[in-house]
């Protein structure tokens, strides 16, 4: 049995109840085979793959808080510090009722390679809680965030581990967490990114993941002689990544006709009104029914079990920006039958392994999230740099750096796919390019 297969079996046996983590490991280990085979003996002796698939540290803690009725609620908090070979742990905090250790481990594992691809000195980590922010008052959100940080602050720091936003964690939550960190640790430092502009946040961090997704998509299309202008796009999600993906797609001359949230989806053949969407989602924190009510061209579809939503619409490009495994084989077949030419992941692992393979087999250009959504964490690293030098750069400076980083990621992913896999296999390209730097650093640092 090959070394990769041995480790895959071991990881499956040891993490049997963590399907998302197994899925992420399966994809990465299977695509880095050519590099592992070149170094099989050394990697095996050094247990390199065993080490890279085992988090350096996992923290699990109780998060008690008092709701508006005076009732005490208890959630579970997590931080997985996966790999610090190339820099302090870096990755977001997810607040969603579905959160469990397997989901946080999958996200932390993906983050190792994504962060490596940015070319910036950041290791991989992720955190979160099964807390559900939906329907909570501002005071309840603050109570939760303060309790969460009261424990988490013992384990993080500007040079140790720097959390940020993810599903359910935006500027409001980061603000409450930052306040509590500063209060307990008595340190004003860049311990979190995605901060407000008045207390150390970076311009363009809010937009960065969505904008970066479009910069990457555009690079991929240009390399294949395709113009994004005039193309029709389906976006899923209606959160931070989706909103700024829609905005940048429109700035590049494309037309985005869909978006979705956890309860329904919109088809708007005139093109999504992004300002209205921001008002509904960022300001009112309301459902997409409010978007449809305010816009006559929009059709609202309630989400039903087994219904395939935005992926049934005929489009040239699909950008899944909501959550993991939201695009399955049936969706992929529908998109291909409708003539889709490119799929780029804004979310983390939104496409199932079977759907990814179907796209690749059908010559659809496919950009994996760890490359195409890396603009968010890259700009977080730029926020860390600004905090360290106690300066703030202009929007244009940050945006220009983000564009350069995304173009560079595409160049490296493309080159790695050509060198080690097949041309246009950007999944293999991303995993290999991300892996090479981390492995080099791990080997240089000895058995740790
Ligand atoms: P938000 O919380 O801002 O938005 C998430 C969106 O997806 C919301 O519209 C939400 O619906 C919808 N959604 C969430 N979970 C589900 C679900 N289980 N089923 C259906 N819809 C769902 O999160 P982000 O935009 O920040 O994150 C979206 C994705 O992008 C995630 O996979 C995240 O890990 C990834 N990502 C985020 C980055 C960032 O910088 N924020 C960076 C890189 C990747 P509703 O409005 O009803 O809540
Ligand atoms: O998945 C991700 O890359 C993020 N949620 C952003 C992480 C970060 O540290 O900015």
Image (tube, helix red, strand yellow):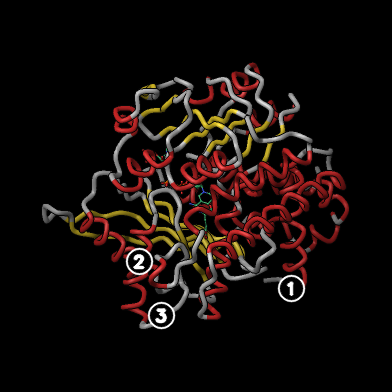
| Quadrant for the C terminus in the image | bottom right
Q: Which residue is the site of mark 2? A: 177
- Secondary structure under the numbered disc 3 in the rendered image: loop
Mark 3 crowdedness (10 Å alpha carbons): few <14, some 14-19, many ≥20: some
- Secondary structure under the numbered disc 1 in the rendered image: loop
Q: Which residue is the site of mark 1? A: 446
Q: Earlier in the sequence, mark 3 or mark 2?
A: 2
Q: Residue at x 44, y 56 (%)?
A: 165
Residue 125 can be seen, yes or no: yes
Q: Earlier in the sequence, mark 1 or mark 3?
A: 3
- How many numbered marks are there? 3
Residue 16 can be seen, yes or no: no
Disc 2 from disc 1: Cα separation: 35 Å
Q: Is residue 254 above or below residue 88?
A: above
Could you say which disc has been placed on residue 188 in the image?
3
Question: Where is residue 181 drawn, in percent x and y?
Answer: 36, 73
Mark 2 crowdedness (10 Å alpha carbons): few <14, some 14-19, many ≥20: many
Question: Where is residue 349 drawn, in percent x and y?
Answer: 57, 41
Beta carbon at label 3 within 8 Å of ligand 2: no
The answer to which quarter of the image holds residue 24 is: top right
Disc 1 from disc 3: Cα separation: 33 Å
């Amino acid at each position: 049995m090959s070394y990769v297969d041995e480790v895959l079996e071991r990881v499956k046996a040891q993490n049997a109840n963590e399907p998302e983590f197994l899925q992420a490991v399966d994809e990465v280990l299977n695509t880095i085979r050519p590099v592992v085979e070149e170094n099989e003996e050394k990697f095996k002796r050094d247990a390199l793959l065993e080490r890279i698939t085992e988090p350096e540290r996992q923290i699990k803690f109780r998060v008690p808080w008092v709701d508006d009725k005076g009732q005490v609620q208890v959630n579970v908090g997590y931080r997985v510090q996966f790999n610090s070979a190339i820099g302090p742990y870096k990755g977001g905090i997810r607040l969603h009722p579905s959160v469990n250790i397997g989901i946080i481990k999958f996200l932390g594992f993906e983050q190792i390679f994504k962060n490596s691809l940015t070319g910036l000195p950041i290791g991989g980590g992720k955190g979160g809680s099964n807390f559900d922010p939906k329907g909570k008052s501002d005071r309840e959100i603050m109570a939760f965030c303060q309790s969460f940080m009261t424990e988490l602050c013992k384990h993080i720091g500007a040079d140790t581990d720097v959390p940020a936003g993810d599903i359910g964690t935006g500027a409001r939550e980061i603000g409450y967490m930052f306040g509590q960190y500063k209060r307990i640790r008595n340190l004003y430092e860049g311990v979190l990114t995605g901060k407000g502009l008045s207390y150390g946040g970076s311009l363009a961090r809010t937009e960065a993941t969505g904008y970066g997704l479009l910069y990457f998509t555009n690079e991929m299309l240009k390399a294949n002689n395709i113009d994004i202008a005039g193309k029709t796009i389906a976006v899923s999600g209606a959160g931070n990544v989706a909103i700024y993906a829609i905005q940048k797609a429109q700035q590049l001359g494309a037309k985005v006709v869909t978006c979705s949230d956890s309860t329904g989806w919109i088809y708007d053949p005139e093109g999504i009104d992004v300002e209205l969407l921001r008002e509904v989602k960022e300001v009112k924190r309301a459902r997409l029914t409010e978007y449809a009510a305010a816009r006559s061209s929009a059709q609202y579809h309630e989400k039903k079990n087994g219904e395939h939503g935005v992926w049934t619409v005929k489009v040239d490009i699909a950008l899944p920006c909501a959550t993991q495994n939201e695009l399955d084989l049936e969706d992929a077949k529908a998109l291909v039958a409708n003539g889709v030419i490119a799929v780029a992941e804004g979310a983390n692992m939104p496409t199932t392994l079977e759907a990814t393979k179907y796209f690749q087999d059908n010559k659809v250009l496919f950009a994996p999230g760890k490359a195409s959504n890396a603009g968010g964490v890259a700009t977080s690293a730029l926020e860390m740099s600004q905090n360290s030098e106690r300066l703030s750069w202009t929007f244009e400076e940050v945006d220009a750096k983000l564009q350069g980083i995304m173009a560079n990621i595409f160049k490296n992913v493309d080159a790695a796919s050509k060198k080690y896999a097949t041309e246009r296999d950007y999944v293999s390209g991303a995993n290999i390019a991300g892996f090479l730097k981390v492995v080099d650093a791990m080997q240089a640092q000895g058995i740790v």
